[in-house]
């Protein structure tokens, strides 16, 4: 207790220096906390913005579909898988999608397109594509055999609201799938590849056109927290419905995002280490100056029988008080 009191009094022998040092520590600590919070908050926003539109936080699909995208590789028990996900407290939204590659033709112009059949009631909460419409309405608002297209695809084919596109593709059973779809909306996501190639239609129309028999290629889920992917995967495995199916997390489907985050974290931590080193030298500088100012005092104390270990303890306690004071502030 006596050493603590001595250390406390020694701090106020030069109050300006002690306050400036504590202030530097307080500033550095606050800056470090703010930068870390901002950085990790940015990561969460980056993940949500990137995965919400396309991959979601979690996807369920048939074994091998991710590698070969074969039309016949489908999830058959769509309702069962969606029910498990809907009942999870960790999941905020879920939808199913069918996918096909087709030839789109309008007024003599043709282009290969990525056709996605979506459940309009669930898709608006998963991808939010309805909020990215430049003009027109969303799927499900205007009857059957309607579609929405990316703005770059619309420019390529000279499409506008009311245009009728002829589609030609291959059904799940290998038969020819052909239809005429009316454009009811044009969207823009900001992702050039997506806006240039994607054409969406209602899942019921997709199901009839490609003979899907109520199956789907992907079941996509948005989680309340992206870190809960493994827990939701465990719930799916426990349901007993995953035979012949695979589940993928957002970072498995979009490894580039994870790599970008890891690289940014490494560069950020280098900066944090530099900041900590600078603050540490500030404390060390105060410590050294205090020692040089009290050389005679220490000599007297040592001559009176004070142990060197006790002097070191007092000095370290002073530094601890200043550091804790700065952190608390």
Image (cartoon, rainbow, N blue to C red):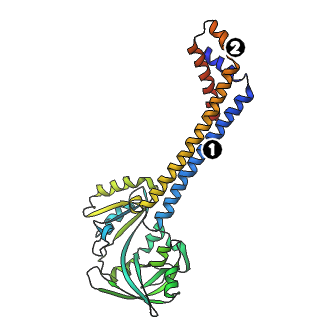
Q: Residue furthest toward the top? A: 304
Residue at 56 percent of width and 43 percent of height: 272
Residue 176 image-quadrant placement = bottom left
- Foreground pick, 195 / 82: 195
Residue at 41 percent of width and 60 percent of height: 255
- Foreground pick, 296 / 60: 296
- Foreground pick, 295 / 252: 295
- Foreground pick, 39 / 147: 39
Is 204 situated above or below 126? below
Is residue 329 visible in the rendered structure shown here?
A: no
**x and y, in percent, of residue 79 in the image:** 33, 68
Residue holding disc 2: 296
Is 110 situated above or below 114? below
Residue 179 image-quadrant placement = bottom left
Pick whichever of labels 1 and 2 is earlier in the sequence.
Answer: 1
Q: In which quarter of the image is the N terminus?
A: top right
Is 257 situated above or below 108? above
How far is disc 1 from disc 2 in space, using C-alphas?
A: 39 Å
Judge from the rendering whether residue 282 lies leftward or rightward of residue 153; answer left or right: right
Judge from the rendering whether residue 79 lies leftward or rightward of residue 33; answer left or right: left
Report helix, strand or loop for mark 2. Answer: helix
Q: Residue furthest toward the bottom? A: 108
Is 57 situated above or below 177? above
Q: Nearer the viewer, mark 1 or mark 2?
A: 2
**x and y, in percent, of residue 278 in the image:** 62, 38
Residue holding disc 1: 31
Report helix, strand or loop for mark 1. Answer: helix
- Label 1: few (<14), some (14–19) or many (≥20) C-alpha neighbours in 10 Å: some
């Amino acid at each position: 207790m006596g050493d603590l009191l001595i250390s406390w009094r020694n701090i106020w022998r030069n109050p300006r220096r002690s306050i400036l040092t504590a202030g530097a520590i307080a500033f550095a600590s606050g800056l470090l906390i703010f930068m870390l919070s901002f950085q990790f908050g940015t990561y969460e926003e980056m993940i949500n913005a990137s995965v919400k539109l396309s991959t979601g936080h979690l996807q369920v699909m048939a074994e091998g579909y991710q590698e070969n995208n074969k039309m016949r590789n489908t999830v058959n028990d769509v309702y069962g898988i969606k029910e498990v996900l809907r009942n999870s407290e960790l999941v905020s939204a879920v939808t199913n999608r069918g996918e096909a590659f087709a030839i789109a033709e309008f007024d003599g112009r043709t282009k290969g397109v990525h056709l996605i059949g979506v459940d309009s009631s669930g898709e608006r909460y998963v991808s939010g594509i309805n909020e990215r419409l430049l003009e027109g309405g969303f799927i499900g608002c205007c009857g059957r055999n309607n579609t929405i297209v990316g703005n770059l695809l619309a420019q390529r084919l000279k499409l506008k609201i009311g245009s009728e596109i002829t589609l030609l593709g291959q059904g799940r059973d290998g038969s020819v799938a052909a239809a005429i779809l009316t454009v009811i909306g044009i969207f823009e996501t900001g992702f050039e590849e997506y806006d240039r190639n994607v054409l969406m239609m209602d899942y019921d129309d997709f199901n009839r056109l490609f003979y899907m028999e109520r199956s789907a290629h992907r079941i996509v889920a948005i989680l309340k927290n992206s870190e809960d992917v493994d827990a939701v995967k465990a719930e799916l495995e426990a349901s007993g419905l995953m035979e012949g199916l695979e589940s993928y997390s957002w970072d498995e489907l979009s490894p580039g995002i994870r790599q970008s985050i890891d690289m940014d974290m490494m560069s950020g931590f280098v900066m944090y280490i530099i900041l900590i080193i600078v603050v540490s030298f500030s404390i060390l500088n105060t410590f050294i100056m205090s020692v040089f100012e009290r050389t005679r005092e220490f000599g007297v104390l040592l001559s009176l029988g004070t142990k060197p270990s006790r002097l070191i303890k007092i000095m370290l306690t002073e530094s601890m008080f200043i550091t804790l004071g700065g952190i608390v502030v």
